[in-house]
Image (cartoon, helix red, strand yellow):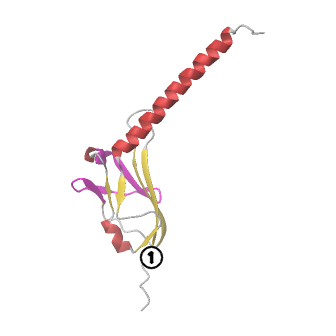
Amino acid sequence: MRAPVRRSELLLLVFLGMVFAVSSTVVVASVTHIEKIGLTVVGLEDGAVLRAAAFRDVHISAGDPDTLERVEVLVDDAVIATRRDGDRLTLESFTPTEGDHALMARVRSTMPLIMDVVVDHEFTVDNTAPSP
């Protein structure tokens, strides 16, 4: 026997359909946003061990150079000053101390519900001279 569909069940089904549609749209928009930005940290690989002097070669680039105006760079949760140099951002007068660090470059989304673009790299500064 088949029972008639209740109004509350129909409303629940419509509500769940709307939630799915909105969620799918947000996910697709976020992925498109992340791909369009193309944020990259150049000169620093995740897990790298380098000397402090080598850090001056690190810079940030983006697929859309206009996006660079919105990039925020943090090392160990402290904002680092940047300078625009053509189609890239350089870290201004920043020399990391010895030890483990985390660099994060991020572009905050200008649209609500769309994820920020974030690139994280952990690195270690080791200024110990190589043994002869």
- Indicate yes or no whether the magenta region holds residue 80: yes
Nearer the observer, 10 or 130: 10
- Indicate yes or no whether the magenta region holds residue 88: yes
Image point (42%, 85%), residue name? 130
Residue furthest left in the image: 86
26 above or below 44?
Answer: above
Image point (28%, 45%), residue name? 64
Image quarter of the C terminus: bottom left
Residue furthest bottom in the image: 132
Residue 18: % across, % down: 54, 21
Q: Write down the quadrant of residue 83 in the picture.
A: bottom left
Residue furthest front in the image: 1
Nearer the observer, 61 or 93: 61
Q: What element carries label 1?
A: loop
Q: Write down the quadrant of residue 54 in the picture.
A: bottom left
Residue 28: % across, % down: 44, 34
Nearer the observer, 83 or 26: 26
Instruction: Give the residues drawn in magenta, as a range.
Output: 67-90
Image point (41%, 85%), residue name? 129
The residue pinned by badge 1 equals 126
Residue 12: % across, % down: 64, 17
